[in-house]
Image (cartoon, grey):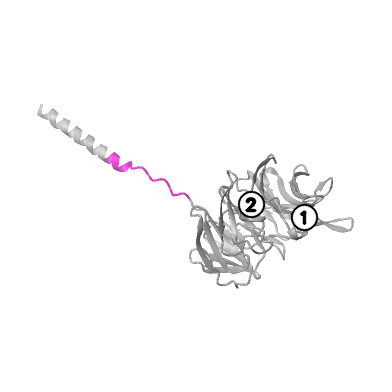
Amino acid sequence: MKINKILLIGLLLGLLASITVINCDDKPTPPPEPEEHLFYIAPAIGNMVKVFSVEQAAMVDSFVVDSVDETWQMRIHVIGDDSLLAVSTAGKTFLVDLETKGVISTFPRESVVFSRDSRYYFNYNPTGLWSNPDHTLITDETGAIFWASFCNQTETMSYVYTEPVDDENWPGLGLYSITGDSVSNHLKYLGELLVATTFSYPITRLGKVFVSMTYPGYGLVAADFGSDTVRTLKLFNMWASIVPVVGPDDKYVFFSDYGLTQIEFAPSEYIFVYDANSEDSVASIRYEGIDMVDYMVISNDSKYLVARPYNEFDNITTICLIDAKNFNVIGVYDCGYLPGVISSKFASRNGW
């Protein structure tokens, strides 16, 4: 009987010990903190960069790029995962360490457009597609006449080139396959000759490029390289300029119209959203705090869009933050200066 009691006590003590161990080891792991969405904003002219946080709804940091003169214009691009900032101006590109805010290296090219993953960049004047960070020239034979745009997966690059037609040079739309290492030049028609402008955005998996045109009308079209056809998405009034951007998830194309009101241009005051696959209209977002929009940046998770004003009269210092999933304005925030180029890690954007 004594033995049974001892055994019973031992079993109970062992059970309690095991329960204690389970409670210690199985403490729930706290969920990871959500990633902060940071947008880096350069001035139209100057050398100070400000950092805007979506979560804090405020400018949370600022720093001066010492190697840049305060009278210069900067083009900036966040390299990779928020560790470096490429600052292009005055014939070279400076790489800034975003932790120390100091310049760590330079390379001799100014008009630089980086791919979303920063593995490649296109340089205008002289024209060339380069790999990064080893700066190896991939091709300088595209014939591009201005900047190029990379698809979100960095597989293709679209650009505008000139094509001789009836003893005149007309702009055409080109597509360069980075992975396939080939150039495919296509001159697009839409009943009459389609004049592509410098603004385009390719989606490789769909085999199409969204491109603005100025003839035979002012608007946005989808150029399908598979069927060699062009489809009109939306036409605007005379003198409209349009710059498209596609979110990193390749789901929607965003675009707006802008121009010179001195020549009686009247903006629509909307950012238009179309389904990139079906090319159907999805939403119209009436932006706030801005007269016209000519530049948009979309966060790497396609959740947020920051719209920059087209500063026709150099009097707007605000940016407009938009929910890119639900298509509504979140808020308007003052930069304290005329905003220039805006960047965010792995973001998609139009223009430089």
Image position, residue 32 (x, y; %): 43, 48
User: Which residues are the magenta region?
Assistant: 21-34
Front one among 12 and 73: 73
Whole-percent x, y for residue 312 in the image: 69, 61
| Quadrant (top left, top right, bottom left, bottom right) of the C terminus | bottom right
**Residue at position x 29%, y 39% in the image:** 22
Identify which residue, 99 or 120, lies in the foreground. 99
Residue 283, compared with residue 139, is above or below; it is: above
Find residue 239 and name its label.
Answer: 1
Q: Amino acid at mark 2?
A: Thr
User: Residue 43's image quarter?
Assistant: bottom right
Residue indicated by mark 2: 154
Based on the picture, tell me whether residue 28 belongs to the magenta stretch: yes
Gap in angstroms between the C-alphas marked 1 and 2: 32 Å
Helix or strand or loop: what does disc 1 sit on?
loop
Q: Which mark is residue 227?
A: none
Q: Relative to 255, is 80 on the left or the right? A: left
Q: Quadrant of residue 96?
A: bottom right
Residue type at tag 1: Trp
Farthest residue, direction top? 1
SS at badge 2? loop
